[in-house]
Amino acid sequence: MTYRPQAEVEQLTVKAARVHQSLVQLRGRAISSDGDVTIEVSIDGRITDMVVSQWFSQASPGKASAAIVLIHSAALADVEAAAAEIRRELTEDYRVARIVDRIVTERQTRHVDNNPADDRKSIYDKW
């Protein structure tokens, strides 16, 4: 069997595009224990939907903002857990692992040379 690097690159590109599209469409959701607040967030943490009950409007500003922060954090945890499952398709691919290892090795070599311009985070940290 002939090794075809271009075919491998195309396969990885298709896989990465599929994972990216799934992440873009992903939503996390959380509901307060009393049911007064429901928040839905996208993978980047933006609130995409929020529903509050009429009783919620009677809460003090401090209690209302604390509830929103708490439910937003829970929705983020929900979306991050789902995203980890989706990302696993890439992170468990041996070809991706080889590429990441190569990049890390190159980055460490450059870092030894004191190149502060290459002190960036991994692409996985941005997800």
Image (spheres, helix red, strand yellow):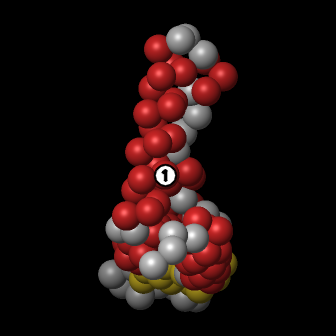
Above or below, 47 relative to 110: below
Circle 1 Cα neighbour tier, 10 Å, few/some/many (<14 / 14–19 / ≥20): few
Q: Amino acid at mark 1?
A: Ile
Residue farthest toward the top in the current orientation of the protein: 114
Give the quarter of the figure containing the N terminus.
bottom left
The residue under the point 65% across, 68% down is 6
Q: Is residue 88 visible?
A: yes
- In the image, 44 versus 40, the foreground residue is 44
Secondary structure beneath label 1: helix
- In the image, 23 versus 58, the foreground residue is 23
Give the quarter of the figure containing the C terminus.
bottom right
The residue under the point 53% across, 11% down is 113
The residue under the point 60% across, 16% down is 115
> In the rendering, at what x and y percent does residue 26 appear?
56, 81
- In the image, 108 versus 74, the foreground residue is 108
Asked whether, in this view, residue 49 is left or right of residue 37, the answer is right
The residue tagged 1 is: 99
The residue under the point 49% across, 52% down is 99
> In the rendering, at what x and y percent does residue 36 appear?
47, 84
